[in-house]
Image: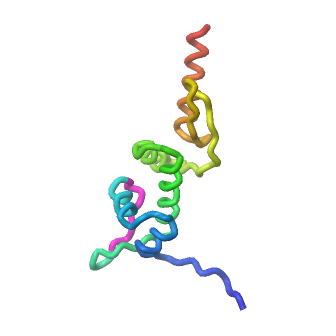
Amino acid sequence: MKGPEIRRLYYSTKEISRMAGISPQMLRMWESRFSELKPLIVKGGRRLYRPDDLEIVMQIKQLYERGLSQDEISMTLKRKDKMAIEPEETIDVSDEKIAYSEKSLLSEIYHELEEILKILNE
């Protein structure tokens, strides 16, 4: 007999690292770099991560894999709308292919630059 799926309230560093496919050292480094990642630290210094922390870790990993810099990832995480990670698309900019998410800051900047270029060409 299979019952309902039990959702855990907290995960250990080892569990989060295994689920995300990163080392515990990388996880701790991300904690220091990204203020949005705030595990609960209990007596003895043990870290406990909530399911929301796991989502943030997975988002950071996905953004790194897309080639975004630390600053770009920080901006993405700080965005009020907490954009969802969308399938990667590419645009051509100066004979270079750049990966981006449709709602990302890069997309907004690209469209603003297109408008400026139209104005300058008139």
Percent coordinates x, y for residue 26 in the rendering: 38, 61
The residue depicted at 33 percent of the width and 76 percent of the height is: 46
Query: Magenta segment: does it hold 108?
Result: no
Work out whether 114 lies above or below 45: above
Q: How is the model colour-coded?
A: rainbow
* Extreme residue toward the right, this view: 1
Percent coordinates x, y for residue 72 in the rendering: 45, 42
Percent coordinates x, y for residue 117 in the rendering: 57, 16
Work out whether 66 lies above or below 43: above
Work out which quarter of the rendered image holds the N terminus and state it. Answer: bottom right
Name the magenta segment's main secondary structure: loop
Percent coordinates x, y for residue 57 in the rendering: 47, 60
* Extreme residue toward the left, this view: 44
Q: Which residues are magenta?
A: 34-41
* Extreme residue toward the bottom, this view: 1
The residue depicted at 59 percent of the width and 22 percent of the height is: 114
The residue depicted at 59 percent of the width and 9 percent of the height is: 121
The tally of labels here is 0
* Extreme residue toward the top, this view: 122
- Nearer the observer, 64 or 11: 64
Work out which quarter of the rendered image holds the C terminus and state it. Answer: top right
Work out whether 92 lies above or below 54: above
The residue depicted at 48 percent of the width and 50 percent of the height is: 64
